[in-house]
Structures are given as C-alpha cells and as structure tokens.
Amino acid sequence: MKKTTLIQIFVSLSILCGTDVAVAETVQISPELIGNVIASSGDGVFDVEISANPENKPTGMVAIPAETVIDGKTYRATEIAESGFSGCDLTMVTFPPTLHKIGKLAFFNCKKLTNAVETTHGSVTTLSYDSFRNTKSLVSVYFPSVVYIPDDAFYGSGLVSADFPAACVIGERAFYECNNLGSVTMSPELNTIGANAFLSCYSLKYIELTHKLQTIGIGAFRFCYSLEFIVIPRGVSSIGDDAFSGCAALKTVYLLNPEYTPDADGSRLLNNSNIETVYCVNNLKPLVVKFYKNNESAPQVRLMSDIVKPVLLSTSAEGYRFKLDALVGDVLDLKVSPFDDIYSYLSMDSEGAYCSPVSTIHLEYSIGAWKPMWYDEQVNANSGVESVVANQAEISVAVDGSCVAVNGADGLKVDVYSMQGVRVGSADIIDGVAMIDLSCRDKGIYLVKVGSRVTKVCLN
C-alpha cells in the first residue's frame, strides 16, 4: 500500500540571516501526485509545485487539489512543475483557483490530453515555454488572465480554438503547426506577434489584429492556407519577411497604416495571387495602384471611406457636426471616438448626427462577424466646409484644483467636453485668461477646445 503522507524530506543547511534553516520538502499529495515545496508563509502553509508521481503516473482525468493537509501542515498547489506531467496519458486536467503558473514542458507530449480547465476562470496567469507542446488531442484552451503566450507554448498541438482575452504578446512559434486551429481571440491591447507564431496553421480563418498591434514577426502567418482576409492596423510599424507568404486563400486586405510601403514590404502580403480587393487609407491608394501596375489580374484598390464615410454637416465653435454613411450593407456596431480610447464614444443626436470637438476621429466598427476594427478619418476632408481657424499662439492649458485654467489671446473661446463629446463648460479668454469651474463634475478625463486646438486634461 502506497503512503499518502510525507515520503521524503531533504534538509539543506544554509544560513539565512544568521539563524534560519531552509528546508526543502517533497510530499505525496495523492498516490499519483507529488508536491515540491517552493515557498512558506510561516503559518504552517506551504506553496508547492505539482508533478506526476514517477512511480505511479496519472492517467485519464486528473483534478489537482487546491490544498492538502499532511501532519498538520497545509500544502497549497500554486504551480505545475517543469516537465511535471510530460508524456503522461492524461485525457483531462483541472486546475484549482490557487494555481497560477504552468511550468516549462509541463504537459509536453501528453498526446491524449483533450482539455485543460481552470475551476475558477482567470487563476492561471503564467504559461511557460513548451507548456502544451505536442498535445495532439488538445481541442481548446481558455486562459483569461494570461498576458504573455511564450515561445513554443502550443507548438504542434491539436487546438481548434484558442481564447486569450488578456494576451498582449504572442511568442515565437507559439502556435506553430497547430493544423486544426480555426480561430484565435486575443486582447485589444495585443502589440506583438512573434516570428513564425502561426506558421502552418492551415485551418486558421480569422484572427483579430487590433489597433494597438505594433509588430508582426518573420513568417508569422506563413502557409496559413485558409486565411481569407487580414487587417493591418494603423499602429503596425514592423512586418517581418514572408509573414504572409503562402496564404493561398487570402482575398481581402485592409491597410489602415498610412506608413505602409508596398514596395519595401518583404512579408509578401500583396503578392498573394488570389487577392480580390485591397482597402486602404487615402494616401496609400496611389502606392498600391502603382504596385499592381503591371499585373493583369490586379485586385480592386478601394478606400476605407468606401466602407464607412464621415460626411461633415457643419463646423462651429462647439466642434464638428457630421453623419456617418455606411456604404457596405454588413457594417455592424458602428461607433466613433475623438481619441484612441476604446471606452470614449460619441453619442448620436436625434437627427442621427455626431458632434466632435476635433476633426480627426477614430471609427470603430464590425464587418459581418468580425471583431471591431479601427482607423482614423478626417471629418472635414473634401467636405467643402471650412474649418474653424483660431489663433493658437502661446496657448496653455492647466488644471487648477477643480478648475481648468487657460492662458491665451483675448477673444478666444474655450469649451470643455466630456469624453462622450458633451460640452460641460465654456468661457471667453479675457485679459489673457479663462477659468472654467468643474467642481460639480466627476473626476476623470476632459477635452479642452481653444479655437481649433484640443487638449486632454485630467481632473483629480
């Protein structure tokens, strides 16, 4: 009969602060699970990393207990040890709410593992290199608190879907050769996709590249044969070589970055032969048309404003009043914001128009079943309506207690708006200064418009 209590104690005598003795323990949590003590709270509670019992490896479904009491001591499972279950014939594993880290190679080569589930969503915050590498039967994962998906984390797994709503960085080869992966969900704050992150994900049809994305690594989407459309957000500053080569089904490309240069792009994005339509922001159209100049089967090149177009109605000291024309039937969830803040939307008035204190707005919308995409648009571009022009020389804006203080030329009008575009105060500059009292307003961010200049301030 196997013991279920303490099986080993290793004592290493190391002097800490002159008197303390560090004790490392390995305890048997169950007949199939071992716990290695990694920390102590000093009150009889010990944090342990969990691994398989090498003499009695677990199979089938395994539920890792949150705490185990042995000889009056409480052992709390907080991590999965490096290579802890590597090669085990697990079919399902559940993680307790106390567990926050999954170590390197923790479930490597667990070819029968179909599900890895948190009993409390969001408890796991850290994955490690190769955590689920070569888990051929793994169907889906949902880790809502994981911010960084490390290199090779799911390399060669059987994933069909991956849901990481907090992930900002995808490491190199994180989903390499996940041949069944059809969809991926990441954070709106996603900023980096590493080299070869989705290489040979043959079934990948959709991934949301949000407006915070900056880097797409070398070969990131190479040989994603099923990828039908891609959005290059405005913030992308680097696209690696061959990032989109071999994307045989790619039909539609959206170029939101005004700095994109087709001729210098080694990603082979626009070289895919099946592309039917390229949508781009205004300044890119001549460059894209030139890129396809000698191509007999060149795709259509259209402007983003062919999808959603702001039509300016009027300008005044209060801002820019405009409507939005959606020129494609499947545009959904149309929103508008004066700044790069996802939560700060303008409201439509009773006549179906918006009012913004600035002429450059951010449009957010969905097309069909897509996730939201963003791009910038000038509401006064080609409208025939003159913009409000003001003397902006030597204007300063500051917060003085609960007041907004503006220094500038006499006669200039000052307006303060909430982040929803609602005017909450106004004044004229007299004797070089204007003071607007916001003591009755909530704390937070406000927009201060002086002539045509807009400044963001924080009321504490």
Image (cartoon, rainbow, N blue to C red):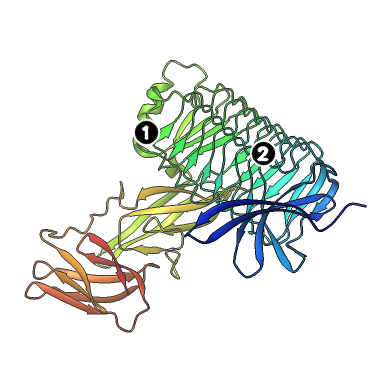
Q: Which quadrant of the figure has residue 133?
A: top right
Instruction: Say whether residue 161 is visible.
Output: yes
On the rendered image, what quadrant is the C terminus found in?
Answer: bottom left
| Neighbours of disc 2 within 10 Å: few (<14), some (14-19), many (20+) | many
The number of callouts visible is 2
* Mark found first going from the N terminus, 2 or 1: 2
Instruction: Say whether residue 144 is visible.
Output: no
Q: Which mark is residue 100?
A: none
| Front: mark 2 or 1 | 2
Residue at 60% over, 39% down: 129
Q: Which quadrant of the figure has residue 450?
A: bottom left
Q: Which mark is residue 284?
A: 1
Residue at disc 1, secondary structure: helix
Residue 442, above or below 364: below
Residue 244 placed where, x, y %? 53, 27
Kindly identify which residue carries mark 2. Answer: 105
* Direction left: furthest residue: 431
Residue 248 placed where, x, y %? 61, 24
